[in-house]
Image (cartoon, rainbow, N blue to C red):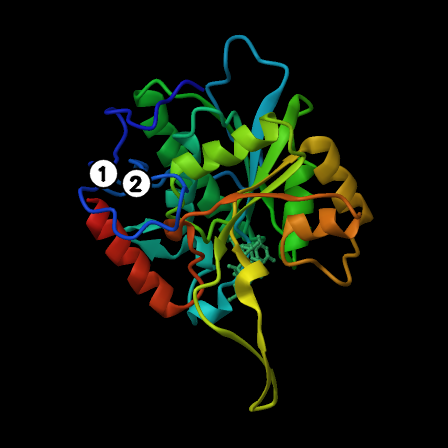
Amino acid sequence: MSMSTADPDLPGPAADPDPGPDPGPGPAPVAADPGSTAAPAPPEPAPAVAAPTTTAPPTTAPTHRVAVVVPAAGRGERLGPGAPKALRELGGLPLLAHAVHTLLAAPSVDVIVIAAPPSPEGVAEVHRLLSGLADLAEAAGHRADTRVVPGGATRQESVALALAALPEDCTTVLVHDAARALTPVDLVEAVIGAVHGGAAAVIPVLPVADTVKAVEGDLVTATVDRSGLRAVQTPQGFTRELLAKAHAAADPAAPATDDAGLVEALGLPVRTVPGHAEAFKITTPFDLVLAEAVLRRRR
Ligand SMILES: Nc1ccn([C@@H]2O[C@H](COP(=O)(O)OP(=O)(O)OP(=O)(O)O)[C@@H](O)[C@H]2O)c(=O)n1
Ligand SMILES: C[C@](O)(CO)[C@H](O)COP(=O)(O)O
C-alpha cells in the first residue's frame, strides 16, 4: 500500500481547525473519514459464501507484511435492537466502513481480515461493503488485501477465526474493533511503529477521567487510586508469533475482553502508547450521538 494520510484522492475531512482538548501526546485527528464526500458504490450481488475478497494485490509482495484483524461480529446489544453493530450507520455509512476506510488509509497496513457478523447475510453485507470501498481505493491507486471470515460467539473467538485466515507473510498483527469507527489513522501507525520498534505487544491507553469507587451493591467500599489505572483502546499491536501463542493458550470458556489480556496471562510484558479520545468505542446510543458530532466536526 502506498497511501498517505492526507491523500486528496480519498474522501476525507479537512484538517480540524479546533481539535479540542487532546488527551496528551497522542496522535492528532487525521483525514480518514470515509463518509465525507462519497458513499461506497451501490450494492453488488454478494457471493453466497465467505470467499476471500482480494483487491489489487501488490505486484511484488513484501515478506513481512502488516495485517489488521477487525472483530466486527458483535451484536451491539448495548446499542439497542437493530442490525449487528458493525453494520449500523454513522453519517450514512456502516461503522465497519469507517473503520476499514481508516485502515486502508494507513500507509503501513497491507492486509485487513474482517470477522463479520456470522450469519450468511452478515457475511454478504461485509463483502458488499468491501467492494464499495475497494472501488474507491482502486480509483485512488491504493492497494489492500482484504479478507472476510464469519465471526464467532465471543470477541476472542472472532479474533481467533480471523487469525486463522491470515496470509503466511504477515509478521505484525493489529487487532482493531470495528466499533472504534473513528480511530485516527495516526494511532494505527503509532501502534505499528511501536511493534516495529521492538515491543511485542502494544496497546493504546488513556488516563481514567473519573474518580473510581469500589462498591458492593449500592454501598461504596473504597475509593480506588486511579493514578495507576488506564482505559484501554484498540488497535492493539503484536508480533504475529506472540499473538498466535497467546490465542493458542487462551481458554474459550473464559474469554478475555482484549487480546493484550491473553499476553498478560502468559506473564509477558505489554507496552502502552498514548491513546486518542476519538478512538472511543461506540457502545451505547449516546456514543453514536457523540460519534455523529465528531464526524460533523471533521467535515
Ligand atoms: N462475538 C463477537 C463479539 C464482539 N465482536 C467485536 O468486538 C468489538 C468490541 O465489542 P463490543 O463493542 O463490546 O461489541 P458488542 O459485543 O457487539 O457489544 P454488546 O456487548 O453491546 O453486544 C466490536 O467491534 C464487535 O463487533 C466480535 O467480533 N465478535
Ligand atoms: C478490546 C476493548 O475494546 C478494549 O477496551 C474492549 O475490551 C472490548 O469491548 P468489551 O465491552 O470489553 O467487549
Residue shown at 34% from the left, 55% from the top: 89
Q: For residue 107, what is the image quadrant?
A: top left
Q: Is mark 1 on a helix, strand or loop?
A: loop
- Residue 149: x %, y % from top left: 60, 42
Q: What is the distance, in whole Å, between disc 1 and disc 2 at their CAs?
A: 6 Å
Of the 4 image quadrants, the one containing the C terminus is top left
Residue shown at 23% from the left, 45% from the top: 298
Q: In this view, does 117 lie to the left or right of 15?
A: right
> In this view of the protein, can residue 141 be seen by the observer?
yes
Q: For residue 102, what is the image quadrant?
A: top left
- Residue 258: x %, y % from top left: 63, 53
Q: What residue type is labelled 2?
A: Asp
Q: What element carries label 2?
A: loop
Of the 4 image quadrants, the one containing the N terminus is top left
- Residue 112: x %, y % from top left: 53, 33
Q: In this view, does 60 lie to the left or right of 37?
A: right
Compare residues 35 and 83 and report the one nearer the observer: 35
Q: Are marks 1 and 2 in contact (CB under 8 Å)?
A: yes
Q: Please tell me whether residue 80 is drawn above or below residue 127 in the rendered image.
A: below
> In this view of the protein, can residue 45 be seen by the observer?
no
Count of labels shown? 2
Q: In which quarter of the image is ligand 1?
A: bottom right
Q: Which residue position is annotated with label 2?
A: 33
Q: Please tell me whether residue 272 is drawn above or below residue 7 in the rendered image.
A: below
Q: Which residue position is annotated with label 1?
A: 13
Q: Please tell me whether residue 244 is drawn above or below residue 227 in the rendered image.
A: above
Residue shown at 67% from the left, 38% from the top: 163
Q: How crowded is mark 2: few (under 14 residues within 10 Å), some or many (20 or more)?
A: many
Residue shown at 48% from the left, 25% from the top: 108
